[in-house]
Image: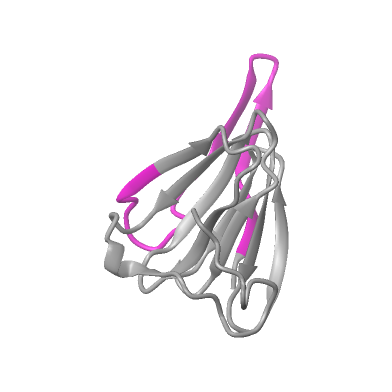
Amino acid sequence: MAKLVNLDTFTSTSGSLTVYNNILPGDIKRVFYIYGAENATRGGHRHHQAWNALICVTGKCCVYTHDGETEQDVWLDEPTKCLILEPADWHVMNQFSADAVLLVLSNEPYRLADYIDDPYPTGRYASSPVSS
């Protein structure tokens, strides 16, 4: 199940430093970020193998997750929050603020065969296709 963690943050008079350190299993093999998505819905998939760490480094967005049993909405609205998605977590990102930049770290390189687009048969998106 998706897990929200608070990243270590160090603040002083010269600003803040937030550290991502050894949260995903294995090495980080892919990094990408989503921006300019204010009215869009992104995601709509889960994975066979990939774990992902999502951090909204500026602005905010909502991440819906469903692991086949439990569904939840998580707001990423501070750069110190990191949402860890396991491969089984079918997810959708939406409600992006105009200034949102969502950083995604993955322990797997992009492979189309790793994606599972069909949502679980129960839950909010069970009969609604999502385009990303």
Span shown in magenta: 3-31
For residue 34, side relative to residue 14 (left or right): left
Residue drawn at x 71%, y 57% is: 74
In the picture as drawn, the residue positioned furthest to the top comes out as 14
- Report the coloring of the rendering: one colour
Residue drawn at x 70%, y 35% is: 97
| Pick the front one: 78 or 44 | 44
**Residue 37, above or below 24:** above
| Residue 85 image offset from top left, x and y in percent | 52, 63
Residue drawn at x 47%, y 69% is: 46
| Residue 101 image offset from top left, x and y in percent | 57, 34
Asked if residue 15 is among those painted magenta in the image, a careful observer would answer: yes
| Residue 94 image offset from top left, x and y in percent | 65, 50
Residue drawn at x 46%, y 39% is: 33
Q: Quadrant of residue 121?
A: bottom right
| Pick the front one: 91 or 31 | 91
| Residue 99 image offset from top left, x and y in percent | 65, 28
**Residue 50, above or below 7:** below
**Residue 11, above or below 60:** above
| Pick the front one: 111 or 26 | 111
Q: Quadrant of residue 100?
A: top right
Asked if residue 42 is among those painted magenta in the image, a careful observer would answer: no
- Quadrant (top left, top right, bottom left, bottom right) of the N terminus: bottom right
What is the count of numbered marks? 0
